[in-house]
Image (cartoon, rainbow, N blue to C red):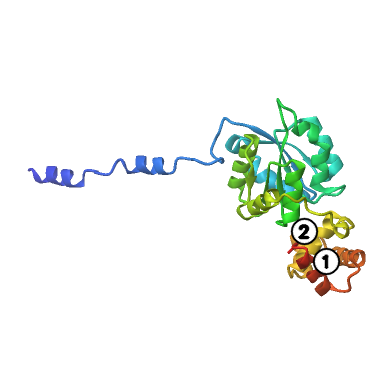
Amino acid sequence: MTEPTDRTERTAPTDRTAPTDRTERTAPTDRTAPTDRRVRVVLVDDHRMFRTGVQAEIGRTESTGVEVVGEAADVDQAVTVIKATRPEVVLLDVHLPGGGGVEVLRRSAALMSDTENPVRFLALSVSDAAEDVIGVIRGGARGYVTKTITGTDLVDSIFRVQDGDAVFSPRLAGFVLDAFASTDAPPVDEDMDRLTQREREVLRLIARGYAYKEIAKQLFISVKTVESHVSAVLRKLQLSNRHELTRWATARRLV
């Protein structure tokens, strides 16, 4: 009559603690976990679809802690919304109608220098060009990340900027270190100053070998619009074709 007892002993669970171990291993440790901390954010980008995507990715306040309090598509809208909402962090695109991200920074200087409740800026752009990175950092932005960043990393970057940290995508930090290590201020490029922000962006992509269709997809514009920008760039720089354009951009280390 002891056999049932033996079977019971043999089949008695010996790993009941396994679920507890799994729970400990999967306990949330990132910014997408429920958090009591909050940060108020304004999104500034001229592409509505991109703003909508970012809002969906990071704007789940209960889980990310990020509250999106405003959006803007150009410089004037951005300045108005930022002054009205006074967010802790602004996600700022570099290339905007009306003067670009640098102009937003210039017109927000007083808000950035507020000693009690400063507004801090984190550049979020498709561009990884050194001149764009250095330009917005000189303008007062606390960091610069590219649009390839994950939602989790973006949330983490936002909180770090709120804390006053400097945040950069890995390969971009070198641009800033090199720029500020130099004792000589970079010369003003009058040729580049003739171009709009969008024309500069198209210029860099052309110089990197992108086809018109690829540029259109990257910038959310039509192929005809790309062609118009290229024609304008060639005319303003007095160049004949995209091969000359590539050499011109390479000589200025824009590629």
Q: Is residue 103 left or right of residue 162?
A: right
Dot 2 amino acid type: Leu
What's the residue at 36%, 39% (across, down)? 20
Residue 40 position within the rendered picture, expressed as x and y whole percent measured from the top left = 69, 33
User: Which residue is at the far top?
Assistant: 116
What's the residue at 59%, 31% (across, down)? 37
Residue 45 position within the rendered picture, expressed as x and y whole percent measured from the top left = 77, 47
Dot 1 amino acid type: Val
Quadrant containing the C terminus is bottom right
Residue 233 position within the rendered picture, expressed as x and y whole percent measured from the top left = 88, 64
| SS for dot 1 | helix
Residue 13, picture quadrant: top left
Q: Is residue 234 left or right of residue 120?
A: right
Residue 114, picture quadrant: top right
User: Which residue is at the far front?
Assistant: 183
Residue at mark 2: 219
Q: CA distance from mark 1 to mark 2?
A: 10 Å
**Label at residue 223:** 1
Q: Is residue 81 above or below residue 195?
A: above
What's the residue at 68%, 46% (across, down)? 54
Residue 66, picture quadrant: top right
Q: Is residue 85 above or below residue 50?
A: above
Quadrant containing the N terminus is top left
**Residue 93 in view of the camera:** no
Marks 1/2 in contact by CB < 8 Å: the verdict is no
Q: Is residue 155 left or right of residue 225?
A: left
| SS for dot 2 | helix
**Residue 3 in view of the camera:** yes
Q: Is residue 131 left or right of residue 177?
A: right
Q: How many other residues sit within 10 Å of disc 2, few (<14), some (14-19) or many (≥20)?
A: some
What's the residue at 86%, 74% (across, down)? 241
Q: How many other residues sit within 10 Å of disc 1, few (<14), some (14-19) or many (≥20)?
A: some
